[in-house]
Image (tube, rainbow, N blue to C red):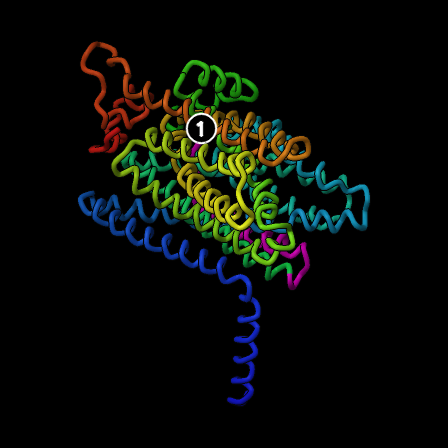
Amino acid sequence: MTSTTLSSRCKALSAAAMDWTLGREWAISVFAVLSAIAILCALMRTRFERAATGSSDSKQAAAFSAFQRSYLVVYVVVMLADWMQGTHMYTLYTEYTNSNSSVSVGTLFLSGFLAAGILGTFTGPLVDKYGRKRACMVYVLLEVTINLLEHINAMHWLMLGRILGGISTSLLFSAFEAWMVTEHRNRGYPEEWLSRTFGLCAVVNGATAILAGILAQVAADNLGDIGPFQVAIGLTMLAGLLIVPWTENHGDSNDKKHDDALIEPAGLVSAWKTVRRERALFAVGAVYALFEGAMYTFVFNWVPTLALAMGGFAQIQPVQGIIFSCLMAAISIGGEVYSFATRFLLPETVGVAVFSLSSLTMAVPVVCELFGCSLPSAFAVQFAAFLGFEMCVGAFQPCMATLRAKYVPDSQQSTVNSLFRFPLNMLVAAGTKLSDYVDLYMVFALCAAAHFIAALTQVDLRWRMSSSAPPPGGGEPPSKAASNVSPKKQRAKSPKRNGTKGKTS
């Protein structure tokens, strides 16, 4: 290739890039600023963590870093594959509908959420009984099968894929987390280090979503709408290989009789009795369902809301992908903010702030509708509110994961988490249909109300924890440092599970 040819190609690429950015400058600028903030936060967190672990046992800190990396690598690959499927699922089903009228996009989506709520609930006891690593491998097999079924333009096969997808979604959000939490404790790492791992998960999840959007677009451009699903198959198989070296753990690995009490359906009954008996655990499940139920409702409605504020779908289409990337960058920032905040505040206190701010951001479209916003400012105000909400989502994910690890018994990690997801999925199934019957601003009013109730419930949880009764046998109420350890750990008084010291309320 001559220098002249190379120069002409570079000029052509430069011209194409200039044409692509034309009219998108503001969106690209916002994404660049948010990305810079996320990177700056990551650098600050790394510096703080090095200073914090410097006073810890160097061998333990090194072992923890290796363990954390082994989990995060699998988490990134699994979430990348999951995000890849979501980017073009709607367009793939729409394409199938054009050539096969029996395919119903709405029915397929609704069936997926219902399957996750009903069938997914019964996976928890099985995960705890037969092993978390084994459940993660089952997830890999299910996902490969599901993505193969997506190649078939037939309603019954696609429906089977959505039903299996409901089960795999339950495994994704229960088995992996349960394995990591139990393995973390089995290895004797400090309890407060769990928040670091959960915080990093939120950060890399936002970055992974951005990468997935780019990879999915490249795959779709070259292989069609089925392309992202084909790439997801390869990524999922890679995740399976990375899981192989993991050690197995079960519900209460330290109890030789852990299998006996977790048979299905008795495991669900036992888990429900535990949730009813422990007020704090019930509160954690309530805020989990309320926040995520409203969050997924937001996912289905942010595009039409911003499109309306911009003047129509034709106006938002050129920048929709970049706006999505901005929202995902905001999630990464939220995860970093959570990691910083928990150095000074308890997770329960951070949760109050997160749920309160979420309620306020969801109320912004309602205020714009009822009190009026001019067209240009309506978009700016609502886009800023949605960025704020996604930051709350980024903080919510590690916050809720920390609270689940803190209050859910080790022996029932997957079972209770699956139980929590039943009302969540029912709320999501209802949320997908809300906009068919009420105006968009009413949908956001309901989301704001759900987050407000979650905030009040979190306040109750925080108050109950700070006013805990004295331990059996008398003595002073637990200190703030001790209160950062879950009640089940306080009773065990395990020296391996000390709470984080120096945090305030």
Q: Quadrant of the C terminus?
A: top left
Predominant SS of the magenta segment: helix
Task: Using the image, determine if residue 120 lies above or below residue 74.
Answer: above
The verdict on residue 226 being magenta is yes
Image position, residue 179 (x, y; %): 43, 36
Res. 111 in view: no
Asked whether 233 or 212 is in front, the reply is 212
Image position, residue 86 (x, y; %): 60, 47
Image position, residue 434 (x, y; %): 64, 32
Task: Using the image, determine if residue 239 lies above or below residue 25.
Answer: above
Task: Using the image, determine if residue 254 lies above or below residue 307.
Answer: above
Asked whether 302 or 181 is in front, the reply is 302
Dot 1 falls on a residue whose secondary structure is: helix
Tag 1: amino acid: Gln
Q: Quadrant of residue 482?
A: top left
In the image, which residues are magenta? 221-250
Taking the spot 25% from the left edge, 23% from the top edge, the residue there is 493
Taking the spot 53% from the left edge, 89% from the top edge, the residue there is 4
Taking the spot 20% from the left edge, 43% from the top edge, the residue there is 57
423 displayed left or right of 225:
left
Disc 1: which residue? 413
Q: Quadrant of residue 249?
A: top left
334 displayed left or right of 79:
left
How many dots with numbers?
1
Image position, residue 304 (x, y; %): 61, 44
Task: Using the image, determine if residue 182 lies above or below residue 391.
Answer: above
343 displayed left or right of 271:
left
Q: Quadrant of the N terminus?
A: bottom right
Q: Residue furthest top?
A: 473
The verdict on residue 1 being magenta is no
